[in-house]
Image (cartoon, coloured by chain):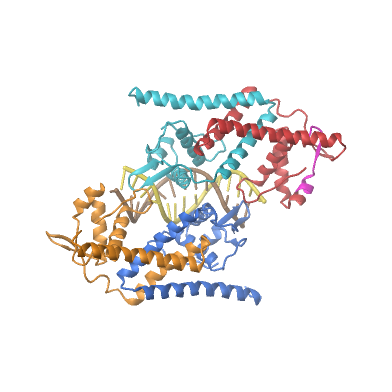
Chain colours: A orange, B blue, C red, D cyan, E yellow, F brown
Amino acid sequence: MYIEINPSSGVPIYLQIINQIKYSIAAGALRPGDKIPAVRELAAQLRINPNTVAKAYRELQHEKIIVAKWGEGSFVSNHGAEDIAKKEKLRIVSEILDNVLVQAYHFNMNDTELKNLLNQRLELLKNRMQVKGKREEEGHE
Amino acid sequence: MYIEINPSSGVPIYLQIINQIKYSIAAGALRPGDKIPAVRELAAQLRINPNTVAKAYRELQHEKIIVAKWGEGSFVSNHGAEDIAKKEKLRIVSEILDNVLVQAYHFNMNDTELKNLLNQRLELLKNRMQVKGKREEEGHE
Amino acid sequence: MYIEINPSSGVPIYLQIINQIKYSIAAGALRPGDKIPAVRELAAQLRINPNTVAKAYRELQHEKIIVAKWGEGSFVSNHGAEDIAKKEKLRIVSEILDNVLVQAYHFNMNDTELKNLLNQRLELLKNRMQVKGKREEEGHE
Amino acid sequence: MYIEINPSSGVPIYLQIINQIKYSIAAGALRPGDKIPAVRELAAQLRINPNTVAKAYRELQHEKIIVAKWGEGSFVSNHGAEDIAKKEKLRIVSEILDNVLVQAYHFNMNDTELKNLLNQRLELLKNRMQVKGKREEEGHE
DNA sequence: GTGGTCTAGACCACG
DNA sequence: GTGGTCTAGACCACA
């Protein structure tokens, strides 16, 4: 699992970890059942405080994105966030989407540019999924 | 100008103010040259401390979205954030957009649903602009 | 006398007036004995509050750069700031000069660039003096 | 880091802090990566309110001169204000430079005196850099 | 321990 | 009446 931390970006480190793990899952680099690194291991790798990694994992457990098995480690869950009401999901996504719109407006980006950018990011995410799939077929990883 | 604060949302109050003012500008409810409420006035209306409003206004000035005139008040600027490099703009919007994608993935929303939602939010924003325009044509407001 | 006000520059309007009158004197556009506009006149011309102009004139009188004659108006003084101790003058100019150096450093400007810029601004100031001199010789103004 | 505040100079305290930190960086007393005092620490040292120091630091962050790391402290940035357009830089420096010229004129200082003073202040700034460098070579500090 | 947010309230400078 | 500065002190979030 590849994670990169920018300690001076303003975004809390624990949040960067959460976001990147979520992104890895969405891109297929991490799949349901996969084991994620132990807290101390990831902390050592990123040279950050284990408490920070622990906090990130705790949040991910709350969101039921990972599950911790006593004595074994943490694994990517296979149910995800299914228990949230559809309405609530729409509300959450709409909120972030509105942020995008407002930001884009203040940057003088028009609808077409924005939609193109969305498609581009979608492609990027999917390409990563494909690459991952291929590499596994070929026995890499 | 209508602003609503949710003190228990986790989002800092001053940021909520910033976001809602930006949204109002994007939706056309606030136009270049328009006066925005005085610091103390908005503070009283929202029942929060004037310093908090002042902080929000200061940030908006830094982003060149509003300008403050001594002893007169604060006004919506007419140049906006034009001086940010195009590349930087794309980076910022892409980042938020990726957050949307990831969130949508974890909610099991597919591409079509996501794109529909984007269109829907765009429409909503534009309707508000139209309504505002119409009301002014008809002499309301 | 030509004065231009930028109400949204952050610099107080009364200070802008002071600075521009001082600059006009340094450039020779205003000379000792010259009459400067009445408070109300300048206020009307710049479309600002007469109090603001009055405050600027008051400050200039304090610095003995202009003198007010009852019932006649205000005039450019012919002694200037001679009564300030040489040491104090050096201190004041050094302070502003240090600000320039620091600002230039943070902008990655080297000594040569800075000195060239100084020469350039000096030339500009002197050209204005020459132009002014010529125009008067030729009977303009 | 040595900072001195003059509470009765008319210059806002937070601005004095900003200017002195900028000067320290220009003089090499503070280098990229160096840690600057914690907000509360500097506030205690200067016997002023922590909020005032925090405000100064926030401004310096906006100018990208320092970066704050959560729970760690604030550090001198290593990129600085590189993203401002060259033209804008010239405008800003020219403006302060014009102030110097005008002030010097009103003090009856001629060009040579002014240029000598500029050289003198430049030397002073550079000496401080050298001293700093030497002290480090010799193992002091 | 760090930086960030917020409140309550005073005082100043500007127009 | 406007925005800006400052204080005193509380509480939170992060590492």
> Which residue in the rendered view is the most extreme toward the left?
A71
> Which residue in the rendered view is the most extreme toward the front?
A138
Asked whether, in this view, residue A24 is left or right of residue D54, the answer is left
User: Any magenta on residue B58?
Assistant: no
User: Any magenta on residue C36?
Assistant: yes
Residue nearest the observer in this picture, B28 or D9: B28
Q: Quadrant of the N terminus of chain A?
A: bottom left
Q: Residue D108: name its quadrant.
A: top right
Evaluate whether residue B46 shows in this view: no
**Looking at the picture, does residue D115 appear above or below residue B94?**
above
Image location of residue C131, percent across then percent down: 78, 36
Which residues fall within the magenta stretch? C30-42
Image location of residue B15, percent across then percent down: 45, 59
Q: Residue A97: name its quadrant.
A: bottom left
Image location of residue C90, percent across then percent down: 61, 25
Residue in the picture at 50% in, 71% down = B125
Residue in the picture at 49% in, 75% down = B123
Residue in the picture at 63% in, 46% down = C12
Evaluate whether residue A36 shows in this view: yes
Asked whether, in this view, residue C21 is left or right of residue C106, the answer is right
Asked whether, in this view, residue C70 is left or right of residue D57, the answer is right
Image location of residue C42, percent across then percent down: 77, 47
Task: Report the number of numbered marks.
Answer: 0
